[in-house]
Image (cartoon, coloured by chain):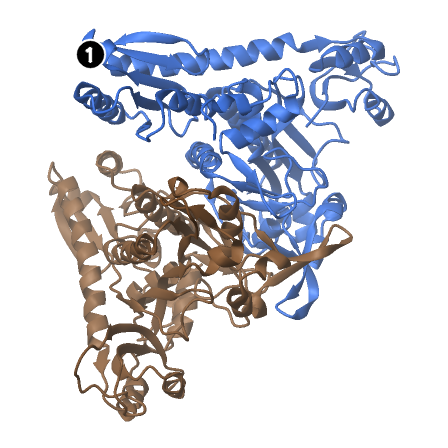
Chain colours: A brown, B blue
């Protein structure tokens, strides 16, 4: 380790991909492992995921969801009951074929997603409309045998939550589908400080087996889009395949209505790529496992040690997550390390400031330093500063997203935009899959989501074929 | 569902095994799945596991441990680097041999435990004594291809935490091994209200690859022993196999010293089998996800509804985990359901009591009902009651354990005890594995742990061969 830790990070404007992996390593979020396509989540990455889990989990529970834990493995026969799902996932599942030294009679796949297991379980416990709704969620690991992998964004094993609900009416299930998308949007904007756009996926991009898929999409600093969380309405597709029937109020047997919705460790990738800079990670205060670091300057100065302890205790009492860096590194090293790790606020407590009843406070987002009074106002001022950082980070990300959001009338417009600087491109579309595929020729541009479906008389033309358009779609280049 | 839910539970004195699975199902802890040997953790079982996780996790973090997340899969080559470990686990691992439609070049096993992955990671990040100690833990699923399975006690997939630490001295690593065993003992006694005995495993029973294994062992209601948590000292065995070297203070390269320690969802099985009765689960208040249930008696009685809401708010404010059963079931059904689910305290709020400023309070452990004043003393009285239940449950379990703890001087003594009523049997042992194996002939009796190693002059004789004994060992029949 060198004294100026930040120098190990490539500039984000020089090589964004290299910058990303440099930050992942320098902030000790994750490390590569000897298992191809799988990463080790180091303490900082794990703490961040735990914080994300805690907040989202509370939001789910407040809206009546309960956690369960389903098996890791799915027998092939069970997996195949719903045709579209297995077709979508077959090329990318890992198969267990041996238990100990014995060949298995039926091979089992490691879950790529758990609709099959939830549906199988629901078919045994759902009998009457009185049993409904069932609103379950699980936090777990899943596996998809990806070829190209990148920490957090695309890995063979990843961690996520998957909600699976069963309802007695389509209205209630559709409401759930939309409500959960709103939960994700709120979480992204309020906690991750990441603005998103929300809409419906096209037929081509929807989840295998869903009636439709809703999505939130975020834009990274470099203008690349990231599908950030999705919510699916299944109608009766799975209930028919897995025989989930209930006696309705009229005493008739009816197939149930289902949803599922998920968000993954990919969110950590979004945090890095929306907020990070050349000095490393920048964490929004509401999601930062540690919000404030205290660095005492000058060893064995009683006045400094006392102030460090006092600040620590007062901040902790006030519910702020704080730690003291009491290692034997130099102050400069400690500052750099806290910056790399994205700690929102740093207190630098030194003798000279203290004699003036001041403390130097550095904010990570702007890297500004200010002097706060070392008195009764300190805790309140730091609370306000944390709020200010949270808001500032969201506004900055929103401005960036808006500055990289474009309108296109023609195919050439899209080409020009994507070649100059990619971003979110609004363009009308006729609904024809050939036109959607044609867009891929422009650096792999794909539909992100349908923002609006035109009704009545209008003059919108498809950006590809020029025929009458059906939808206003946002297009982008994706991770 | 019938109105007297408890009648679905077999008496525990008639058929303990059947009673156990009846309670698991009736309390909605877990369900069998279509994946052989794997269970579905239902909401009540999952909530219980989350509560266990939260408390243990806080205990780990308070003592300087950090969480990480390692990959699920282990390449065969990496797994084989430590000879004893793979020998111990090879017969019971599941192998992934295909990714998508492609045969893998090297097969991967689903982790049965993660010493190999942690050691591989440590070999890349440990360089100097300044990097040490590293005290990491992970909460995850693991898989062992068991033939006979039973919910929570032995399943192919199970959930656990596994701590893995690296130290620069053997003293520090051995201290960690003992400290973590004490953490488990504290957790069992203080939170789960389960008394345990603690000691060292014999060579035959220790963890594959460990220098030695420490264990806590609990006794179920039926006198069967349950290995409840273990802590292993590895010395330099894994560091030599995985090349974890560090520069010590003298500037010399040295192999590091390691430990690992784990506890599993089996703890839920212990809770059921130590505390449960013929009416279902009984949860100690400190581990109960819901400590108090409120049942209002008499529909649409304003005075009842008001008191229900007031009690709920007051208890919640006081930090007690409380819920109102506001379903349209009968009070009798609600009482039975709360009993099956093991809720420690039930408030029955009815008009007649209220007019006397009273509330009926039922405690789950003794099933006694008492009248509490409905005034300012209520919350304090309920807090005290919860404490009393916690203590009473521990004392009752301790008395049971003590009444089923025996001393044996001869092999015949052991036979007599184990045939009459199994329990913990103290008996001296010469240390010879043949004698240990001979004990298995008595209903599968195994050594639980070494309680004491005799020193100096003594007259203790081996319970099997009659030769001079080395250890005082507790023996038992195990799950």
Q: Nearer the viewer, residue B316 or A458?
A: A458
Q: Quadrant of residue A57?
A: top left
Query: Does A370 sit above or below residue A453?
Result: above
State which chain disc 1 sits on. Answer: B
* Coordinates of residue A475 in the picture (x, y in percent): 31, 78
Q: Which residue is mark 1?
A: B375
Q: Residue at x 79, y 8 (%)?
A: B458
Query: Does B377 sit above or below residue A454?
Result: above
Residue A11 shows in this picture: no
* Coordinates of residue B3 in the picture (x, y in percent): 45, 24
Q: Quadrant of residue B287?
A: top left
**Image quadrant containing the C terminus of chain A:** bottom left
Q: Residue at x 54, y 32 (%)?
A: B25
Q: Nearer the viewer, residue B256 or B148?
A: B148
Q: Residue at x 48, y 14 (%)?
A: B393
Q: Horizontal placement of B238 versus A418: left or right?
A: right
**Image quadrant containing the N terminus of chain A:** bottom left
Q: Residue at x 88, y 14 (%)?
A: B467
Residue B76 shows in this picture: yes
């Amino acid at each position: 380790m060198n004294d100026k830790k930040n120098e190990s990070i490539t500039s984000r404007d020089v090589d964004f991909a290299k910058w990303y992996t440099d930050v992942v390593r320098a902030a000790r979020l994750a490390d590569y492992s000897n298992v191809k396509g799988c990463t080790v989540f180091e303490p900082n990455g794990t703490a961040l995921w735990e914080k994300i889990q805690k907040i989202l989990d509370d939001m789910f529970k407040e809206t009546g969801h309960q956690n369960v834990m389903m098996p890791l493995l799915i027998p092939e026969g069970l997996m195949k009951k719903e045709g579209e799902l297995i077709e979508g996932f077959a090329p990318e599942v890992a198969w267990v074929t041996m238990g100990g030294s014995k060949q298995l009679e039926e091979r089992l796949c490691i879950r790529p997603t758990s609709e099959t297991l939830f549906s199988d379980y629901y078919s045994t416990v759902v009998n009457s409309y009185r049993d409904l709704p069932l609103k379950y969620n699980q936090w777990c690991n899943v596996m998809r045998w990806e070829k190209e992998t990148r920490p957090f964004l695309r890995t063979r094993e990843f961690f996520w939550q998957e909600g699976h609900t069963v309802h007695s009416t389509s209205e209630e299930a559709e409401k759930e589908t939309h409500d959960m998308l709103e939960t994700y949007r709120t979480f992204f904007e309020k906690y991750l400080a990441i603005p998103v756009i929300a809409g419906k996926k096209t037929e081509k991009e929807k989840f295998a087996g869903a009636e439709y898929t809703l999505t939130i999409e975020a834009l990274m600093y470099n203008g690349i889009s990231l599908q950030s969380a999705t919510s699916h309405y299944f109608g009766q597709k799975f209930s028919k395949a897995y025989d989930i029937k209930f006696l309705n109020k009229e005493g008739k047997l009816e197939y149930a209505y289902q949803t599922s919705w998920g968000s993954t460790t990919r969110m950590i990738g979004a945090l890095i790529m929306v907020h990070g800079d050349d000095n490393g990670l920048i964490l929004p205060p509401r999601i930062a496992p540690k919000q404030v670091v205290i660095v005492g300057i000058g060893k064995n100065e009683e006045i400094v040690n006392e102030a460090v302890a006092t600040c620590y205790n007062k901040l902790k009492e006030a519910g702020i997550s704080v730690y003291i860096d009491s290692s034997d590194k130099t102050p400069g090293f400690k500052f750099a390390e806290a910056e790399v790790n994205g700690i929102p606020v740093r207190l630098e407590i030194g003798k000279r400031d203290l004699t003036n009843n001041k403390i130097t406070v550095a904010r990570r987002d702007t890297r500004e330093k200010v002097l706060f009074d070392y008195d009764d106002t300190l805790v309140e001022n730091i609370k306000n500063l944390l709020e200010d950082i949270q808001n500032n980070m969201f506004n900055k990300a929103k401005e960036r997203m808006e500055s990289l959001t474009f309108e296109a009338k023609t195919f050439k417009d899209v080409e020009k935009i994507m070649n100059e600087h990619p971003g979110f491109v609004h363009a009308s579309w006729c609904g024809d899959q050939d036109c959607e595929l044609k867009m891929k020729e422009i650096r792999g541009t794909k539909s992100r989501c349908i923002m609006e479906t035109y009704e009545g008389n209008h003059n919108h033309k498809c950006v590809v074929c020029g025929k009458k358009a059906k939808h206003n779609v946002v297009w982008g280049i994706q991770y």
